[in-house]
Image (spheres, helix red, strand yellow):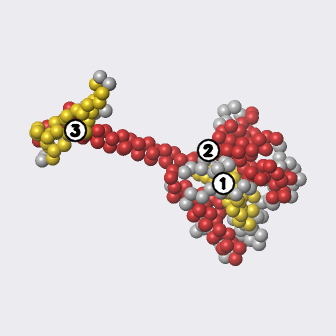
Amino acid sequence: MQAIGEVISRLNNTRMGSTSEICYEHTVQANGKEYTKEIKKITFDGEIFCPICERDRTTQELSDEEDMKVKRAMGRRKYDIFHNQSVLTDEDLLDASFTTYAATKKEEIHNKELASKAFASYKDGGTFTTWFAGDPGVGKSHLGMSILRNLNESGKKNKSCLFISVDEMFLRIRDSFDNKDSRYTEHYFANLLTDVDYLVLDDLGTETGGSGTKKTASDFVMRVLYAITNGRQNKSTIVTTNLTRQELEKMYDRKLVSRLMKNIYVINFEETTDKRIKKHKI
């Protein structure tokens, strides 16, 4: 805390004078009692003030400024999580936005509107799971990324955002079993995905085989997904999947699927065709 002399020096004592006015705002403790300490006010450039009050005000301003710097730094670190720690298999998704989602058919237009409403609700503080379901290539990941990028750019209360390709995440975890230098351990992903405020789990189910498979998830996969869902019970998650609820329940178990689908806002693609299939012109 600044000494009174430092405040006086800062104010340039060549333009300062004494006054007969007293500040009665300060107290001291003596013999178990509290007494008013009379502080003589000073004058500087025609203004009269108490040097202790001025010291306290200046100290508070410095403290507030430091707090603001810390908050800005924390906000920047959370903003950078999206760019530095997301796991994608399709780099084109980094350019995904509501604007670049080509919606011409009725269902496409409707689902784009639903995704925009989900973003607006998240921005207003809503907590729920947005569930994109449908065939591959219809734009589920595109719209999920659009919601996430808008949330990250909006800087809503310094919230952190993360996009995770589920299949790629499990590949990296498995690689860490034999690569002791890898940071992509089960513990790393469980903590990361639990801590972030907004999470996209992209292509849920592909890590076990995807649509049409009769495979069931391994104990390892189940353990990781349970850790994530348990830690995100009161947080917002966006899920994209090619599988129906019945297929997911056969792949995992009903309890896990029930937690994944708790409080969901469903966006189904039933008529939209694969947008990635395009004829190449020469």
Would you say residue 72 is visible in this rendering?
Answer: yes
Front position in the image: 69 or 211: 69
Front of the two marks 1 and 3 = 3
Q: First in sequence: mark 2 or mark 1? A: 2
Would you say residue 206 is visible in this rendering?
Answer: no
Q: Quadrant of the N terminus?
A: top left
Instruction: Find residue 230 and report its horizontal and vertical position in percent.
Output: 71, 45
Seen as rendered, the residue at the extreme right is: 214
Q: Amino acid at mark 3?
A: Tyr
Label 1 – label 3 distance at C-alpha: 56 Å
User: Going 11% across and 39% down the picture, which residue do you hit?
Assistant: 20
Q: Which residue is mark 3?
A: 24
Q: Which residue is mark 1?
A: 237
- Mark 2 element type: helix
- Mark 1 element type: strand
Relative vertical location of residue 54 with respect to residue 248 in this rendering, above or below: above
Instruction: Find residue 163 and report its horizontal and vertical position in percent.
Output: 64, 52
Q: Left or right: 15 with respect to 35?
A: left
Label 2 – label 1 distance at C-alpha: 12 Å
Relative vertical location of residue 140 with respect to residue 255 in this rendering, above or below: below
Q: Amino acid at mark 1?
A: Thr
Determine contact: label 2, label 1, CB under 8 Å.
Answer: no
* Crowd class of label 1 (few under 14; some 14 to 19; many from 20; radius 10 Å): many
Front position in the image: 120 or 32: 32
Q: Left or right: 211 with respect to 19?
A: right
Front position in the image: 281 or 43: 43
Front of the two marks 3 and 2 = 3
* Crowd class of label 2 (few under 14; some 14 to 19; many from 20; radius 10 Å): some
